[in-house]
Image (cartoon, helix red, strand yellow):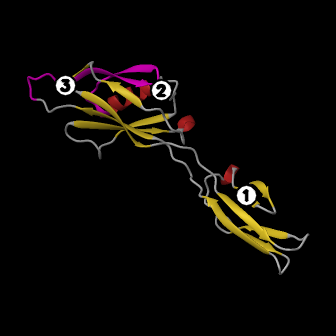
Amino acid sequence: VSVTGTKLGGFQIEFVGALAGAVIDGFTATTAAASATATVTQQTTADPGQSEIKFITIETPRFVSPTPPPGGSFTIKVGGETSTVTYSASHTTQAANIQAALDAFAAVGSGNSTVVFDATKSTATASVYRIDFVGGRALQNIPDFSTNSSGLTRAAARPSREQHGHAPSSETQKIVLKTSARTGSFTLALTHG
């Protein structure tokens, strides 16, 4: 807990550390003197934060033999870094290929994302791969990345974002004491969890 302020202007109580991002209910202030009042008001709402979720969709037209199947590779670019991803018709292999490319980026790093095939968002002509940012990249905004499909035949890859990532933010409450007394005491109480 971090406390700033004065008796005249009120005290700002910010819930940090283990309480950062937690909704604080049950915070009260009471005074010992009958002529004094203490009020507690919420100034900012806690936000537990959220991790970023992105997708890469690989669109492939339906093909009929003898038309060649999709193939080749595409690139993913994050900031100034580019990595090549080999196309695979196998969803498991394609997810692993995208994962390997993301692991190679300094902006992501190994163990900081998971890539899975998303069957619920996919269609007969679009395979969707969900990317969740975890570990050292959880609760952060991840730079947008782009794709270049010029190395693919009969396919195109495009990135999208479902959810911005951001860190937790603390709840802040204000205590205002009103009294004509020059001295006195008040009691703070918190019932949480």
Examine the structure image and report whether residue 30 is included in the region drawn in magenta: no
Decide which of tag 2 and tag 1 comes sooner along the chain.
1
Q: Is residue 49 above or below residue 22?
A: above
Q: Are marks 2 and 1 in contact (CB under 8 Å)?
A: no
Q: Is residue 74 above or below residue 185?
A: above
Pinpoint residue 110: horizontal percent, then vertical percent.
51, 28
Residue 193 makes an appearance in the image: no
Which secondary structure, mark 2? helix
Asked whether 190 or 94 is in front, the reply is 190
Pinpoint residue 92: horizontal percent, then vertical percent.
33, 33
Q: Is residue 193 above or below residue 1?
A: below
Pinpoint residue 12: horizontal percent, then vertical percent.
73, 58
Instruction: Bin the neighbour count of mark 1 within 10 Å (Cα to Cα): few under 14, some 14-19, many 20 and up.
Output: many
Q: Is residue 124 left or right of residue 134?
A: left
Instruction: Bin the neighbour count of mark 3 within 10 Å (Cα to Cα): few under 14, some 14-19, many 20 and up.
Output: some
Quarter of the image that includes the N terminus: bottom right
Which secondary structure, mark 3? loop
What residue sits 16% from the left and 32% below the top? 61
Q: Magenta stretch?
A: 64-91
What residue sits 69% from the left and 55% below the top? 15
Residue tagged 2: 103
Residue 155 makes an appearance in the image: yes
Look at label 1 and name its amino acid: Gln
Instruction: Bin the neighbour count of mark 2 within 10 Å (Cα to Cα): few under 14, some 14-19, many 20 and up.
Output: some
Residue tagged 3: 154
What residue sits 68% from the left and 51% below the top? 18
> How far apart are the alpha carbons under marks 2 and 3?
27 Å
Q: Quadrant of residue 172?
A: bottom right
Look at label 2 and name its amino acid: Asp
